[in-house]
Amino acid sequence: MDVPQYWPVLEKDDAGLMKELEQLLTSRVVGNPYGDDGSFAASIAQLPPGLRAMAATHWLDISLTLDSITWHLATSASLRW
């Protein structure tokens, strides 16, 4: 018989869930996401797939929310003109 899994974190409100995710990611991820040394990519490679996806796309998501894809691509530190 399958026992249903219990995830207490899912009982939290949005702010509580966000705080839990931030603590989890900041405790496991190091490095500059815009750095050239690859330390950020190496640290998120060890995360479970869902957290890895959030960490990998967070900075793009914020950039697109605040500005536009044109602004993001034109000002991205990883681009070398």
Image (spheres, grey):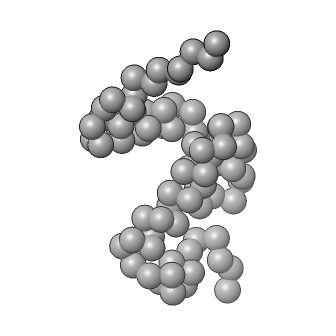
Vertical relation: 30 (above or below) 63 = above
- Looking at this view, is 59 or 1 the one in front? 1
Vertical relation: 4 (above or below) 38 = above
Vertical relation: 9 (above or below) 19 = above
Q: Quadrant of residue 76?
A: bottom right
> Percent position (x, y) of residue 32?
57, 52
Seen from this angle, which residue lies furthest front?
Answer: 1
Residue 39 can be seen in this image: no
Residue drawn at x 44%, y 82% is 68
- Looking at this view, is 47 or 26 the one in front? 47
- In the image, taking residue 18 as reference, residue 37 lies left or right, namely right
Residue 60 can be seen in this image: yes
- In the image, taking residue 34 as reference, residue 26 lies left or right, namely left
Residue drawn at x 63%, y 58% is 35
Residue drawn at x 71%, y 53% is 37
Q: Quadrant of the C terminus?
A: bottom right
Q: Quadrant of the N terminus?
A: top right
Vertical relation: 45 (above or below) 73 = above
Q: Quadrant of residue 66?
A: bottom left
- In the image, taking residue 39 as reference, residue 4 lies left or right, namely left
> Percent position (x, y) of residue 69?
51, 81
> Percent position (x, y) of residue 49?
66, 43
> Percent position (x, y) of residue 33?
58, 55
- Number of marks in the rendered image: 0
